[in-house]
Image (cartoon, rainbow, N blue to C red):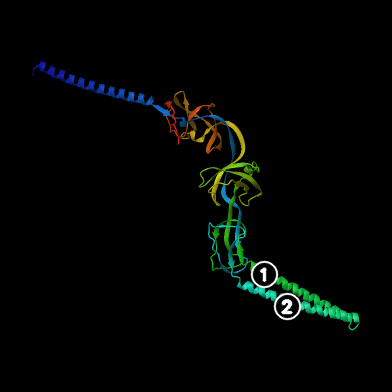
Amino acid sequence: MKSWLKWALLALVVALLASGVWRALSARKLQQETVAKLAAQNTQAVVALGATDVVQVKNRELATGLAISGVLKAVNTAMVKARVAGELQGLSVREGDQVKAGQIIARVDATEYQARVQQAQQQAQAARAQVDIARRNFDNNRSLVEQGFISKTAVDSSTASLAAAEATYRAAQAGADVAGKSLQDTVLRAPITGLISQRLAQPGERVGVEARIVEIVDLRQLELEAGLSASESVAVRVGQSAVLQIEGVTQPVTAKVIRINPSTTVGSRAVLVYLSVDRAPGLRQGLFTQGTLVTDHLQALALPLSAVRTDRAQPYVQLVSGNQVLHQAVALGARSDLDGQTLVALTGLAENATVLSGRVGPLRAGTVVRFAQPASAPSGGQ
């Protein structure tokens, strides 16, 4: 092969290799420029914020206190029990029925007790007849003594007989009263006005003395019994208020301390505090309740607790400075419930600083933000 042809082929191969290297370098450079451009675009992405997306740090009066929990109890409850034994009759009320004080709930079969009343009355009448006989004997003997026909000893004997007859009569009368009371006890009445919460017996059932028939609760006045430790109870006073969250009730309910037990409970050594709960729709005895008993007030810079992020080792907030988001570490203090939200005292921010609210998700530090203009309210609102 001629030498010039070899050099030509070598030159062609070198040219092809150089062209391939140049194209690869150009493609890589273009890719790097594209990535850098996209990164710059992401860095400069602007997040639009509305008025409800930010909150301001304000100096507020916070109510601090103790966490309490327990179940609601009706102040007035009554358990209707059988006072005499017998067959239960006429029990028609069931759980949830309204009853009034003095209303007849049920009866116990009174046949036997009516017979006892008649027996006692007959015995009293017989005793009364004996009193009349003894009194006539006494009057006759006293007249004969005055005339000198008999000795004074006979009068003394008739006096004793009269006293015995009178005592027997009084005992018979008392027996009649006891029988009458038993007859009255066959009628079971509601001692208070309220609602039937439990029905513990059935008509036709034979019940004994002290057998439980129904339970009545009065929901017009409820209270919370909360247990506190000895150290916590020192700060509690009658008249202090509390904000409660009750299961099934959407709105917070207020309560007030009305009594403090002077003794600790056996075993747990807890001090029981009793709070009168304000009336609210849907409250029932036995509902679980938790809340905060307010014991003190303080002034501090505060934010809604939902605005504080805890996805790092130290709590922080997303601070809006200028038109950028900054991550600012904060130290948390006392918490308080106000207007349905939990506020927390904090340090590390200035008053009136603007912070992203909890409804805004996490944003990277340096994110550019802008505030959207609020939409005008439509005329003729609904």
The kind of secondary structure element at disc 2 is helix
Tell whether 30 sits left or right of 126.
left
Identify the residue shown where x is 70% and y is 69%. 177
Tell whether 67 sits left or right of 30.
right
Tell whether 94 sits left or right of 266.
left
Is residue 118 visible from the viewing direction of this image? yes
> Residue 155: horizontal and vertical position, in percent?
86, 79
Count residues near mark 1 (Cα–Cα under 10 Å), then give few for <14, some for 14-19, many for 20+. Answer: some
Identify the residue shown where x is 52% and y is 30%. 330
The residue closer to the viewer here, 121 or 332, is: 121
Q: Quadrant of residue 296?
A: top right
Identify the residue shown where x is 87% and y is 80%. 143
Is residue 157 visible from the viewing direction of this image? no
Residue 299 lies, with reference to residue 234, above or below; the image says above
**Residue at the bottom extreme, as displayed:** 149
Tell whether 48 sits left or right of 210.
left
> Residue 301: horizontal and vertical position, in percent?
56, 30
Give the labeled residue for mark 1.
Answer: 180
Quarter of the figure with the N terminus: top left
Give the labeled residue for mark 2.
Answer: 126
In 3D space, how far apart are the residues under numbered discs 1 and 2 (Cα atoms)? 18 Å
> Residue 277: horizontal and vertical position, in percent?
59, 46
> Residue 285: horizontal and vertical position, in percent?
56, 52
The kind of secondary structure element at disc 1 is helix
The residue closer to the viewer here, 328 or 139, is: 139
Identify the residue shown where x is 75% and y is 78%. 129
Task: Please report whichever mark, 1 or 2, sits nearer to the chain's N-terminal start.
Answer: 2
Residue 271 lies, with reference to residue 325, above or below; the image says below
Residue 122 lies, with reference to residue 329, above or below; the image says below
